[in-house]
Amino acid sequence: MKKQEKIIERILGSLLTVFLLVSCVPVPVMPANEGTPTSVNTETAAIKLPAPYLSPYTNPLDTPHTYLEDSCLYLINRWNRLNSEPGTVVMIIMLRDIITIFNEEERRNGNVDVNDLRQILDQLHAQGFEAIRTKQLLAFMERNVKIPPRSVLIIQDGTHDLENYDKSFREYWQRWGWPVVNGWVNQPNLSDELWEQNIALENEGFVDHQPQGVTPQTILTDDSSKVVIARELKAPITPFIEKFQKNPIAVIWPNGGFGQRTVTAARLLDYQLGFTTNSRGPVMYNWVPLADQYDPNRPTFIPEGKIGDPLMTLPRFWPHEALNAIDQVRIMGEEAKAYALTNKDVEFEYYRQVCEPIYGQMPTP
């Protein structure tokens, strides 16, 4: 075990060194809907890919951002009949504490009344949604791997004990097999009992733990020191490997704070997804609603579009708006599917002109 720990520390130390060297270097921003590999010549194509689906249910400032550079592989994965069908949509919901005495301050803090939570989960199930895990979301977002056409990722922020999960979520795990993602704050001096409870929950498959920093009140920004950024992102990795027996793949940005430097650091530490507290809408394959400019009507929302890494700045619905958004998310998925089918012939013709000389005919299962 000590040998394994030394190896882990050596690897992470190397990654951190790279991070410290490049932490002040901006990452080039990939314009939305553009970017193909140099081997794919789109200039000679007589046809262009259709613009991404636009929804009337998102804020006009929250526009769809794409993130896949290879348009040909995107089309192969998009139309592979073994993958997720077009219009597959994921609703990511943020929860904090689940309480029985509710007021306006609790709402602003992202807490949810226990009865409201039951209503949200029951309505999701009634409208055909199924809960997924972080690994499933990553595979879907990167390669369009098959998930339920209406999926939900339920993330509860903060470190919690067994009673929290038993009271609020276990019935849904037992009835429907719905897991919960936990934003684990790896604070020093956590009790052995709390660790044992959460290790058991992880091993059961009921709770999918992902890091949310180490200091409860920390908010990461581009003004954060290198020491603070490294502490919040690097420190949880070794405990996750040792306790939960897995490498974390996602970061729940502590208290919603992030920036260009923090995203760069997270990537260097091999995080592959990041979740903000910006509520902008659901996500789909190669489709993430983000904002490129500050909105005075939503002053707490950090503009994330120009960071150029949509997978590391995924939006989440706040609990007080989740219930009313469920029907809209379902409709968005249906509209996106109809839009894709309308443009299918155009996309296949684009593939024939641009991609076929390199990748061959569109694969069919």
Image: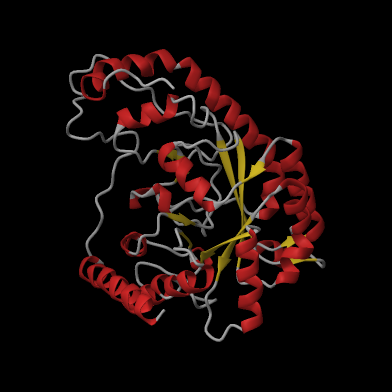
In this picture, is 334 found above or below 13? above
Q: Residue furthest bottom?
A: 189
Q: Position of residue 254 (x, y in %)?
A: 50, 68
Q: Residue at x 17, y 31 (%)?
A: 39
In this picture, is 125 found above or below 45? below
In this picture, is 67 found above or below 95? above
Q: Quadrant of the C terminus?
A: top left
Which image quarter: residue 98?
bottom right
Which image quarter: residue 3?
bottom left
Q: Position of residue 132 (x, y in %)?
A: 60, 47
Q: Position of residue 116 (x, y in %)?
A: 78, 54
Residue 100 visible in the displayed image: yes
Q: Residue at x 36, y 16 (%)?
A: 348
Given residues 275 and 139, the one toward you in this image is: 139
Q: Residue at x 44, y 17 (%)?
A: 343
Residue 225 visible in the displayed image: no
